Image (cartoon, rainbow, N blue to C red):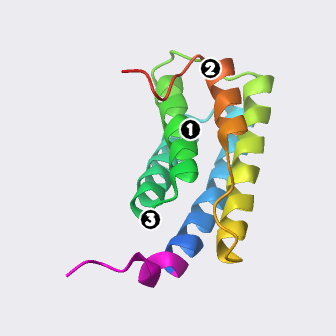
Amino acid sequence: MPVDLNEYKQLYLETASDKLSEMTDLLSAVEQRHDPKAQADFHRLAHSIKSQSLVMGYYQLGLAGKILEALFRAVQKDQIKLDTNIFEIIKKTLNAMNQSLISIQSQQGELNLSHEIQSLEEHTKIRLLDP
């Protein structure tokens, strides 16, 4: 019997909103103190957002989560150094993701986050769709 994902929509929206709020708080710790635990927690939350969004069929939110996950994986491996520009783009991305959740909640559907995703790709050299 197929699973009706609409049954899980409200739970997804609540948990995704909580995760994004926590990510915003963690980003401050990363920006101010370069806290390795905050980096690891941010990475874990981005992974969760990515996975849950894709399962629920929210592709743009899933891709945004995927690039944030990849970015913080690279940060943890000292492959990328976060600078002021990247922090600002991450903040804009988290805000856009929150706005998308609000849009989904109000039955208007997911927002297009391609601008934010492309900005992160350009400034970090991470490519989501590389083979």
Q: Is residue 2 magenta?
A: yes
Instruction: Identify the element where label 1 is drawn.
Output: helix
Q: Is residue 111 above or below residue 123?
A: below
Name the amino acid, label 1.
Leu
Tag 1 and tag 2, C-beta contact below 8 Å = no
Quarter assignment of residue 64: top right
Give the alpha-carbon distance from disc 2 to disc 3, as whole Å.
27 Å
Residue beneath the point at 51% across and 47% down: 46
Instruction: Identify the element where label 2 is drawn.
Output: helix
Q: Which mark is residue 56?
A: 3
Q: Which residue is mark 2?
A: 124
Task: Please state the extent of the stretch shown in magenta in the rendering.
Answer: 1-10
Q: Is residue 7 above or below residue 73?
A: below
Residue beneath the point at 46% across and 30% down: 73
- Of tags 3 and 1, the one toward the viewer is 3
Q: Is 131 displayed left or right of 109 in the figure?
A: left
Label 1 environment density (alpha carbons within 10 Å; few <14, some 14–19, many ≥20): many
Give the alpha-carbon distance from disc 1 to disc 2, as whole Å.
10 Å
Closer to the camera, 118 or 85? 118
Q: Which residue is mark 1?
A: 68
Name the amino acid, label 2.
Thr
Provide residue 122's location: percent of width, then percent of height.
67, 19
Residue beneath the point at 71% across and 43% down: 93
Closer to the camera, 129 or 81? 129
Q: Is residue 107 above or below residue 65?
A: below
Label 2 environment density (alpha carbons within 10 Å; few <14, some 14–19, many ≥20): some
Name the amino acid, label 3.
Met
Tag 3 and tag 1, C-beta contact below 8 Å = no
